[in-house]
Image: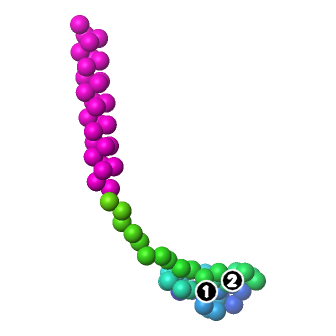
């Protein structure tokens, strides 16, 4: 972390130019104060969406093969 007395931003009251933010850090820019917070990540089931995507890719591929075959007749 690099500090400078003329910094416009502070993290947890410490002047700085560069740092890694952590959950709960207080960011002050001039008179504006913001708290940096991360929510818990949630993974939703994507099996149906993935299956539909692969089915669509297969359908488009078969359609293109059929179109090429039809055009070459």
Residue 9 seen: no
- The residue wearing badge 2 is 33
Residue farthest toward the right in the current orientation of the protein: 31
The secondary structure type at the circle numbered 2 is strand
Quadrant where the image shows the C terminus = top left
Which corner quadrant of the image does residue 30 belong to?
bottom right
Which is more N-terminal, label 1 or label 2?
1
Residue 66 seen: yes
Q: Is residue 65 left or right of residue 28?
A: left
Q: Is residue 24 left or right of residue 49?
A: right
For image coordinates 76% across by 83% down, the residue present is 31
**Residue 65 placement (x, y as % from top left):** 25, 23
- The residue wearing badge 1 is 26
Which corner quadrant of the image does residue 62 belong to?
top left
**Residue 39 placement (x, y as % from top left):** 48, 76
What crowding class fits label 2: few (fewer than 14 Cα within 10 Å), some (14-19), or many (20 or more)? few
In 3D space, how far apart are the residues under numbered discs 2 and 1 (Cα atoms)?
Answer: 7 Å
Queried whether the magenta region covers residue 61, the answer comes back as: yes
Query: Please, what is the dominant secondary structure of the magenta stretch?
Result: helix
Which corner quadrant of the image does residue 41 belong to?
bottom left
Q: Is residue 28 above or below residue 51?
A: below
Q: Is residue 21 left or right of residue 3?
A: left
**Residue 34 placement (x, y as % from top left):** 65, 81
From the viewer's side, name the closer residue of 55 and 9: 55
For image coordinates 31% across by 37% down, the residue present is 56
Residue span colored magenta: 46-73
Mark 2 in CB contact with mark 1 (< 8 angstroms): yes
């Amino acid at each position: 972390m690099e500090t400078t007395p003329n910094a416009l931003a502070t993290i947890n009251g410490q002047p700085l130019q560069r740092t890694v933010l952590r959950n709960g850090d207080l960011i002050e820019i001039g008179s504006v104060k913001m708290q940096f917070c991360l929510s818990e990540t949630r993974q939703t089931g994507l099996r149906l969406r993935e299956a539909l995507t692969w089915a669509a890719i297969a359908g488009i591929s078969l359609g293109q093969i059929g179109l090429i075959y039809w055009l070459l007749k």
